[in-house]
Every structure is written in C-alpha cells, then in structure tokens.
Amino acid sequence: MERGVKEVNLKGCMTIGPKEASAALSVTSIVNHSIKNEMNKIQYLADQLKKALGGLPYDTASQSVDELYRITNHVQEMVNKIRQFSSDLILHEEAVEMDMLVDEALLLIQPYAEQHRVSMVKCSDLQQQKLIVHCDSIYVKDCMVNLCFNAIEAMKPDMGLLQVRIATYKKGALIEFRDNGTGILPADLARIQEPFYTTKKKSTHFGLGLSYCQQVMTKHDGQLKVESQFGVGTSVALYFPKSRTRRVDLKDK
C-alpha cells in the first residue's frame, strides 16, 4: 500500500451534514441503542461459557469471561457519557493512537463477528508511522463499534468480510469500514442520515447508529461519509480534520 492517501474520491458518496445530525435524539433511545448492541455480545459470550462449562477447554471459558468484563466496562463508560447527553455532546479529549483505538473497538465487536461467522481485517496506509488523533476516545470507539455492527448484520455468515482501514489524506485522516454485504438502495441511502430511520426489519433496531455517529464526528469537526452499491457492499468512513491529527515516526515512539 502507498504511504498515504493523496486524494479521496468522494464522487457518488452521500455526506451526512451537521443540519441532519443536530436533530434531537432522546436520552432513552440512545441508551437503548448502545445497551442493545452490548447485550447481543454478552448473550453470545454467555452461550460460550455455558458450552465451556459443559466440557470445552478452560481457556475458552477464561477468554469469554475476559471479553464479558471488557464489554460490561464499555457499557458503563457509555452510560456515564450518556448521562451528560442532553442537546449536546461533551467531549473529554486526549491524544490517542488510532491504531490502538481501532484494535479496542474490534475486540469489543469480535464476539458478535464470531457469532455471525464474519471475518474482520485491519490495515493501514501508513508505513513506519503511527497516527495520533486528538479526540474523545470513548465516543469515537463507540462509533466504530456501531459501524462494525451495521456491517456485520449486512453480511452473510461464512462469506462476510469487514475491512477496516486507517489512512491519511491531504485534509486529515480517515478510518474506513468496508463490507461486502447487501449494500443500500439509492432511495434508502438518501435517508439514512435521518434519526430513527432504519433499513432493518427487526423491531429492536432503532435507526440511531449513523445519526449518533455523525453527531460525534460533527463535535470533532469531522464528517461521516457513506458510499454503497446495492448487492455489492457499503463503505462508511470517519474523517478527522488535519488540525486534530498528526503522524509520528515509529522510531520516535
């Protein structure tokens, strides 16, 4: 791969703007959405524990317990964040190594990916460098988890591949989540920025994921961009402005 991304082709992409993202999202709905995602993973790990206690190796049970602790800690972090949420998000910013933040998000989503028999791979366009982003790591990580959930649910078991890419371009840096799922119809693509709009048929889906993620990115002076082709797959990217990013040579670590 090239060291950086010189140009980002946004032709045919739908940009979710601040106007749509500023639509009111109720505290109760946001809590339901976040906790629903985590409960799905906890249920899967509980099933794994049940099987392990029935005769699978001890390491399997121990690993599942570690995952449960990680997920419940994430739920607690998000509940604490959401308590502060009314009409605005309050950021607690820090300098974060993006590669590590992506790894943490993928660890959180791993049980769900295993349950749906979907593969995940991570890559970076940076060579011999690490990307530092000034952000609220809890909110950004939760955005990544939400996007991974959407991607996994759109893919077929044993055939799904979620590719997560870290890259830079002339105006900043991006994290892309690309799946080979069902894709989104053009008519739906035009509406997915609307709070509570969802293309999913199950009643447990509230259609808050993208609106929430866009609100987080707007607070970070960034953008969320969606590109999709029905029957082929979808790409969702989080764009961070140059003012919030910097590259550091690994030898200087």
Image: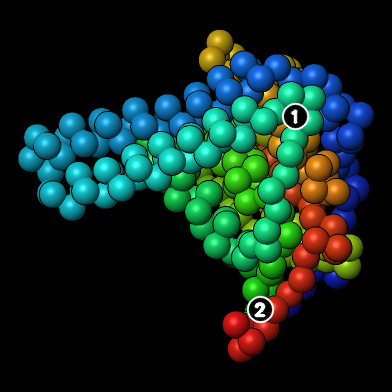
| Residue 213 shows up from this direction | yes
Q: Is residue 19 left or right of residue 53?
A: right
| Residue 157 shows up from this direction | no
Residue that lies at the very extreme toward the bottom in this rendered image: 251
Figure check: 56 above or below 183: below
Task: Say whether disc 2 or disc 1 marks the residue closer to the N-terminus.
Answer: 2
Q: Which residue occupies 89% across, 34% down?
A: 18
- Residue 93 position, x and y percent, is 70, 53
Splitting the image into 4 quarters, where does residue 165 fall? bottom right
Residue under label 1, please give it.
211
Image quadrant occupied by the C terminus: bottom right
- Amino acid of disc 1: Ser
Identify the mark at residue 129; answer none if there is no mark. 2
**SS label for mark 2:** strand
Image quadrant occupied by the N terminus: bottom right
- Residue 182 position, x and y percent, is 62, 32
